[in-house]
Amino acid sequence: WMITPGATGGSLVLNGFSPTGLTRLTAQPNGDGDWTLSGGWAESVLPQAGSMQFGIAQGTLRWPGGNADMHISLEHIRERDGETVHLTLAGAPAPQEFSRQAFLRAFEGDELRQNLLYSELLPRRLDWAIKMESILPSQTNSRYFIPFADGDISVDGILDDVVWAKRFRPGTGPVGELASLRPRTGSALWVRWNHNAVCLATQISSGPVNAQLEVAILPAFEVSLQDSGRFLLQVDAAGNKRFRYFLGTVEEPADYAWPLEVHEKEGTRTVEMEIPIEILEETALPKTGKRWRVNVQWFRENGNGKREVLAQWGDDDIMALAHGALFVFDGGNG
């Protein structure tokens, strides 16, 4: 379980998972370490057959707080027929090294739980599941809303097309301009989408030695996190481009290439690309609410052949896309 402060004064939120299920609870205080619980639950019954069940969760929590043990008495009321299962759970504080990030990495790295969340629960628009998914990804500040921006781009690396104009989301501010996890002066990443393509541009001031770029994309992970196709784009210091494709961890022949240009000016390197819709499978197509997992790194090779990361979006491991940044496509009316 991961316990965090709730939206109202004194309340708590409990997000939990088991090998086959998910639960999200809100705890309201009754005083003296007693709490009332309400929320939702879901469980894969026969994962191989895609069978699952879900419903309302309610009960009580005994937890004085701090490093004390907690005891939960819970009812799972199944949505389909109202059948009620009674559960009694006990928990102790996790070791200090098991951080929030470690909890979320375990959550998002599991094939069964991701399938349950993205293929079964979110399409049903269950409020508790939507809130549970909103705590992802495990990387801090790595959930990005990608704005809809109609229009064509001239892929030249200059970024003067109207598609690249600033975009704003009510209550959020500018969107589609993504902050690097390893800030470097002059580094930037912009993403837009429309019904023809996903447009991505990134830039870095790398000085006298040109930085190299890698962009890894997992566009369809709802059904199978481990076996879905993923793209890897590489641009070397000389500006040469390489397009690669993996099915899970196995590299397959790459029978695609999308428009991409590298632009150099006064020590700044810009890469602009357009990912055409027609190269994507149906399950990967961008639409309102669709998620992609993405890792982006600018780097250069230092004297001993090791990678020096200059700017980064997503996970440290470029191909660890289960833990990549979450791109959430916004607007566009479907």
Image (spheres, helix red, strand yellow):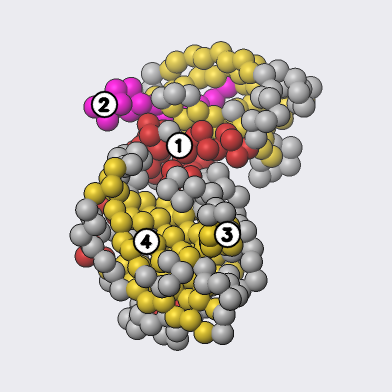
First-in-chain label (3 vs 4): 4
Residue designated by label 2: 48
Residue 295: x, y in percent? 46, 55
Amino acid type, mark 1? Gly
Cα–Cα span, label 4 and label 1: 23 Å
Label located before the other in sequence (4 or 1): 1
Tell me what residue is drawn at x 47 percent, y 38 percent.
Answer: 108
Q: Is residue 308 magenta?
A: no
10 Å neighbourhood of mark 1: few (<14), some, or many (≥20)?
A: some
Disc 3 crowd rating (10 Å Cα; few below 14, some 14-19, many 20+) is: few
Distance Cα–Cα, label 2 vs label 1: 18 Å
**Residue picked out by circle 1:** 109
Q: Circle 4 sits in a helix, a strand or a loop, which is it?
A: strand
Q: Looking at numbered disc 4 in the image, what kind of residue is underneath it?
A: Leu
The residue labelled by disc 3 is: 302
**Closer to us: mark 2 or mark 4?**
4
Is there a contact, CB below 8 Å, between mark 2 and mark 3? Answer: no
Q: Residue at x 44, y 55 (%)?
A: 294
Q: Which residues are magenta?
A: 41-59
